[in-house]
Amino acid sequence: MIKSDFHMHSSFSGDSKVALGHMVHGAVARGMDTICFTDHNDPSFPYPCEEGIGMFDLDTDRYMDCLSQTADLYKDKITIRRGVEIGIQTHIYKELNDYVQKYPFDFVIGSSHLCLGIDPYYPAFWESRSLKDGLNVYFEDIRQNVHNYNNYDVYGHLDYIVRYAPGKNKDFRFADYSDILEDILKTIIQNGKGIEVNSAGFRQGLGAPNPCAEILKLYRSLGGEILTTGSDAHKPEDIAADFDRVEALIKSCGFKYYTVFKDRKPEFIKLD
């Protein structure tokens, strides 16, 4: 059984209202051995309305202090690691690199929440694009990121875009993007990085995690070994959600281990 959730959020992220301590309590109740908080830091996020301004700007000093205090408080019950989820964009590579180097993170997820300055979550992204055009431009953006930015440990939810595409993943055809995805995955592997398998896709109605099985199989066939497991939970009831399905899937894709991180170094845990 997978007992490590390495993608979790708290009220330090603007899209969660749950205090960090309450999330820890939920993880303990779910039998987790190790968790890593990865609250959002998305510099240069183009907020579509004034009400959202700042919701992805992490107060990192206060966050790290809170993590240290909470880890000490719960040290006899669960191991808590210090992580962050950074939003990678082409024009802020130096800013992100300086930020990551400034803090003693255990783990850094690099994610693409924005493409050409807009989140595919918003319908405006799709107004002038077909499904195929939208997916192509998104994956090409990730390709540019992995070739030019390297200060992360795993790339998060590689096919995040399908959560919000018209029809979700109903019309997604892996073969249409396999060349781009193969180059992305080869580059990730060559750079000594990994990917995550994010169970939120099940909750989002995809019937699959992010990324999908085809991407996971390709990653493994190319020699990919670093694979973290995360729920992307923003509330306690979603912690480790669908990890039984994730475990069965990654085993079927050929993985014998999943990965946790400490001090930015991978540790491999054998799957039962």
Image (cartoon, rainbow, N blue to C red):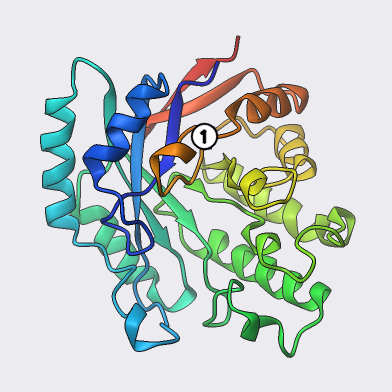
Q: Nearer the viewer, residue 257 or 52?
A: 52
Residue 250 drawn at (x, y percent) = 69, 28
Q: Nearer the viewer, residue 81 or 15?
A: 15
Q: In the shown orientation, is residue 215 left or right of residue 197?
A: right
Q: Quadrant of residue 168?
A: bottom right
User: Which residue, given by chain and number where applicable, does mark 1 sit on?
Assistant: 228
Q: Using the rendered image of the protein, determine whether residue 254 is visible from the camera's viewpoint.
A: yes
The kind of residue tagged 1 is Thr
Within 10 Å of disc 1 (Cα), the crowding (few <14, some 14-19, many 20+) is: many
Q: Using the rendered image of the protein, determine whether residue 263 is visible from the camera's viewpoint.
A: no
- Which type of secondary structure does the marked residue at label 1 adopt? strand
Q: Which image quadrant: the N terminus?
A: top right
Residue 126 drawn at (x, y percent) = 71, 82
Q: Which image quadrant: the C terminus?
A: top right
Q: How many labels, in total?
A: 1
In the picture as drawn, the residue positioned furthest to the bottom comes out as: 128
Residue 138 drawn at (x, y percent) = 66, 70
Q: Nearer the viewer, residue 8 or 17?
A: 17
Q: Residue at x 58, y 20 (%)?
A: 257
Q: 242 above or below 7?
A: above
Q: Residue at x 61, y 73 (%)?
A: 120
In the picture as drawn, the residue positioned furthest to the top comes out as: 272
Q: In the shown orientation, is residue 158 left or right of residue 230?
A: right
Residue 203 drawn at (x, y percent) = 62, 47
Q: 78 above or below 106?
A: above
Q: Residue at x 71, y 88 (%)?
A: 127
Q: In the shown orientation, is residue 13 left or right of residue 178?
A: left
